[in-house]
Image (tube, grey):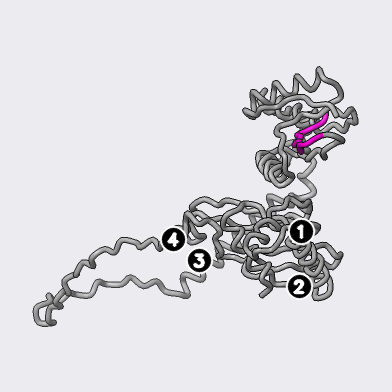
């Protein structure tokens, strides 16, 4: 195994984000206690790793740690890290798949996009070190013994006299059935096909009058009631989703590193926000800002920020590039 890969594995136990410059970054995500699908085991807390290809900036963490562990100069450490990044990209492009130590597997999609599949079962949370899944044991009940009944001998049982069976002659039974069938057929014929001599007579008891009723053309529909809260949420989503290009944004957070901004972006998407994006740093700026929408003017921005503060409990301010 490449020593750099093993070093990155150990580094993830003490850092939530490790960036390989010009390649991508590994970001740890927390997972709470949970039950397995069959509710037979309790799995402890864990930290699983994800890969973000957008984290390619040089933050110096990997090179500085590599310099201290190898006892080399910082300049040489930065050079070795850069060389490792180039060799890793070349190997994945040539072999299509690459096992990155115990962390996971890199592969290329048919369209040439880099994909990452983390290894299942590895936990980077040192606070949970040594904790194994606990199996839930169902309480066993003590079996109850049922006494075996003792059969009585034939001599002890009273002699039961057979009951007389009333049997009906089969020929007579089928005769009654056939007679009922014939009578029913004749009655149905006269009721449904009346004689032509009496069909137009007003005195005929067999005259059938059919009344047709027109169906109501207009049916009343019950109006659908919509709560005011749903209307406000729909209006807010429609307002934030309206494409504008004013350069005025609703900003939720400001971070010095893109890795922390990416984590904030993922949390906002999980809360239901759709138009969440990271604003790139402009000239002379030091922070990455996370926006949940763009508005046409400041008045609209202040109104939207006030609603979000009330409904989502977020600290939002209006920012113009």
Q: Residues within 10 Å of mark 1 (few under 14, many from 20)?
A: few
Q: Which residue is mark 4?
A: 131
* Mark 2 to mark 3 CA distance (whole Å): 84 Å
Does label 2 or label 1 sit earlier along the sequence? 1
Which comes sooner in the sequence, label 1 or label 4? 1
Observer able to see residue 226: no
**Considering the image in quadrants, where does the C terminus appear?**
top right
Mark drawn on residue 75: 1
Measure how far apart labels 2 and 1 are at the Cα level. 31 Å
Q: Secondary structure at mark 4?
A: loop
Location of residue 255 with respect to 89 vertically, above or below:
above
Disc 2 versus disc 1: nearer the observer:
1
The image's mark for residue 259 is: none
Closest to the observer, 314 or 216 = 314
Q: Earlier in the sequence, mark 1 or mark 3?
A: 1
Residue visible at 76% across and 38% down in the picture:
288
Could you tell me if residue 171 is visible in this image?
Answer: yes
């Amino acid at each position: 195994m490449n020593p750099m890969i093993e070093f990155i594995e150990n580094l993830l136990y003490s850092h939530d984000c490790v960036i390989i410059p010009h390649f991508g970054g590994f970001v740890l995500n927390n997972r709470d206690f949970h039950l397995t699908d069959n509710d037979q085991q309790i799995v402890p807390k864990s930290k699983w790793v994800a890969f973000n290809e957008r984290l390619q900036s040089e933050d110096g963490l990997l090179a500085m740690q590599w310099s201290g562990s190898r006892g080399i100069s910082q300049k040489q450490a930065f050079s070795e890290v850069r060389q490792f990044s180039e060799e890793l990209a070349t190997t994945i492009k040539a072999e299509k798949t690459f096992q990155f130590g115990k962390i996971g597997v890199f592969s290329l999609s048919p369209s040439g996009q880099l994909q990452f599949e983390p290894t299942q079962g590895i936990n980077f949370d040192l606070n949970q070190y040594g904790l194994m899944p606990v199996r839930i044991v169902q309480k066993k009940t003590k079996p109850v013994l049922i006494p075996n009944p003792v059969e009585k001998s034939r001599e002890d049982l009273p002699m039961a006299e057979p009951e007389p069976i009333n049997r009906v002659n089969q020929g007579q039974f089928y005769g009654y059935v056939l007679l009922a069938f014939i009578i029913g057929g004749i009655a149905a014929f006269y009721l449904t096909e009346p004689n032509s001599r009496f069909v137009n007579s007003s005195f005929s008891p067999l005259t059938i009058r059919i009344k047709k009723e027109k169906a109501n053309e207009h049916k009343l529909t019950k109006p659908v009631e919509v709560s005011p809260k749903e209307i406000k949420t729909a209006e807010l989503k429609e307002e934030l989703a309206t494409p504008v290009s004013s350069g005025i944004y609703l900003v939720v957070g400001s971070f010095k590193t893109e890795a922390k901004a990416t984590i904030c972006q993922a949390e906002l998407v999980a809360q239901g926000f759709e138009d969440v994006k990271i604003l790139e740093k402009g000239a002379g700026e030091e922070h990455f800002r996370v926006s949940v929408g763009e508005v046409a003017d400041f008045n609209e921005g202040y109104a939207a920020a006030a609603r979000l503060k009330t409904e989502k409990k977020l600290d939002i301010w209006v920012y113009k590039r």
